[in-house]
Image (cartoon, rainbow, N blue to C red):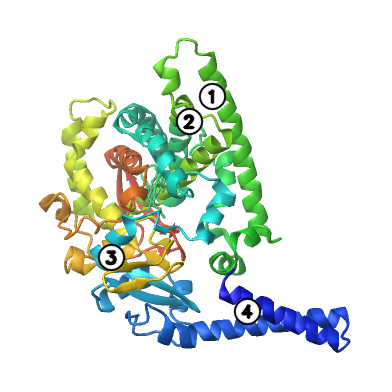
Amino acid sequence: MGVQSLLALAVAIGVTSYLKLHGASYSAILLGLLASTVAQLAISLAFSSLIYRWFISPTKSLPHPRDTPFILGNLIPFLSEPWGFPLARWQRTVPTTTSGFYRVFLGPFDYLIPKSSQAVTTVMTQPYLFHKPAAVRDGLVESLGVGLVAAEGSVHKRQKKLLTPIFGMNRNRRLVPQMWAKALILADKMQELVIKFDGHSDILFMHPLTMAATLDVIGVTTLGVDFDSVTRPDQPILKAYQRVFPSFENQSATEKFFGATLPAIISPHLLFKLPLKPIQEFHQGMTFLQDFCLAQIKQKKQEIEDDKNDTIDVREKDILSAIIASGLEDESEILSHILTILAAGHESTAITLAWAIFKLAQHPIVQDKLRAELQAATRDMKGKEMSLDEINSLTYLRCFLMEVFRLYPAFPAMMREAGNGTLVGDLHIPKGKQIMVSPYAVNRSQELWGDDADEFRVERWEESYSGGAKSSQAFLTFSSGPRICIGKDFATLSLKVFLVVLVSRFRFEEAIPGWHPIIQKGTSLKPQGLKVKVTLL
Ligand code: HEM
């Protein structure tokens, strides 16, 4: 029990005894306890924001953003902008210290932000010392179970060892035909929409289409199930995901406010019990997904058991079959892996694909160059799908995608917490200190990428394989170190396949010249209402 909790307990006992001694009724005692709790909370908040942070904290000497109001700290930019935006501004304006960290204040809570590549390395290469904060982990466990995203320490190490080979190059080779088929279905759907409109071109909202298409890819590659979300937007898995991860576009102003604020201030255990409509929708969606995935697990187990010849086509049919064939028997762990892969795999890829198409529309010269590369590579193929090696030999496609990844990381901020007190250079980071690593800010750092860090410049990847970055920690779209995204190559491959198919069949142009979609506030880089003009080639 911490000092604060002991103090709170002592005050509660004191208040109760005092009121009892003076013959107060039970309701008066209850009211007294409530009043003392509110008073303690106010005193504790005032102490953290006005005294501890400035005069006592071991990180008190670190710089902070210049425009920091005393009590609220930097809370307003975090509530009113996508998280990456203020972090990218501060990456440039807050002075660099010897430890490489600076700090920001979300109301009474202090966060350390690693700014230099050395500070980023310190945090990312020691994932079990700087682990996910309990509140983040509890939220993940509550929804996905203890899969790779939520696991820590030795459990994470064991799970990563188990799953890494399943996401290796050999699997990717097998996945290309499935990804290609799904990309063709997306292209057919877009063609149908365009033809229905005026036979030639139409303005399409891309994000719902990319969400459906990437969900279909993850369905067929992970479970071997064709969700068919692109052609059937009312299919139940897509509906369930729309309940679990609602888009802000479909929410009322109150839902938006609570959606952005409550998870930051209430523990997940309590949050998931609140009788609010979005929470009930979340539970209904999750229950549906869990039941569906559990049924798939049982069916796959049976198929593998029935396969007396132990054939590779059955064991390696999809990611779920490979997980079962690896010898993992615990059904609840398999369920967590599948829920994690489905959730972590489709929305991030959908967001990136939508941004990639938007950048093509904004940069016609880049689009022409990419199309020329694809035409040269597929000239003699007569519409046949490309192999993994052929796709990976498309150098301009790689450069284009890397620049999209750099500027539009699907997750602009990752939360961490110091599991123990530790010394970084001359800085003592106390146990429990909250840390925020921002792929969005680091990927746009002028110190790491040069003065043109904000510009969309594909050539930087043509000039140098690393894009000219000054450090291996300058590109954090997929995180780095032992917790690096396990689906990095999977996502890259499926995005390449989608782009090869779509750029070969359509021209993308800005729907309104100079228009830019709004980015959803909070922890993802989800674009709202991203639209482009799509013309049949
Ligand atoms: C463009 C697409 C993607 C992006 C930008 C992305 C980004 C990330 C990031 C930043 C993390 C680290 C999160 C953290 O530690 O707080 C992560 C972890 C993870 N991602 Fe991805 N991801 C993408 C696609 C995928 C796909 C397609 C899959 C699976 C098929 C996947 C599965 C995972 C898993 C399982 C983890 C946890 C890894 C670990 O903790 O060891 N991701 N991803």
Q: Earlier in the sequence, mark 3 or mark 4?
A: 4
Q: CA distance from mark 3 to mark 4?
A: 35 Å
Q: Earlier in the sequence, mark 2 or mark 1?
A: 1
Q: Are marks 2 and 1 in contact (CB under 8 Å)?
A: yes
Instruction: Give me the disc on residue 7.
Output: 4
The vertical placement of 170 against 107, above or below, is: above
Q: Which residue is mark 2?
A: 320
Alpha carbons under labels 2 and 3: distance apart: 37 Å
Which mark is first along the chain, 3 or 2? 3
Q: Give the labeled residue for mark 3.
A: 119
Q: Label 4 is placed on what type of residue?
A: Leu
Element carrying mark 3: helix
Query: Is there CB contact under 8 Å for labels 1 and 4?
Result: no
The amino acid sitting under disc 2 is: Leu
Q: CA distance from mark 3 to mark 1?
A: 45 Å
Residue on which disc 1 sits: 300
Q: Can residue 45 be seen here?
A: yes
Q: Position of residue 447 (x, y in %)?
A: 19, 68
In x, y percent, where is residue 348?
A: 41, 50
Eye-nearest disc, 2 or 3: 3
Do the CB atoms of the residues marked 3 and 4 lie less than 8 Å apart?
no
Q: SS at mark 2? A: helix
Which SS class for mark 1? helix
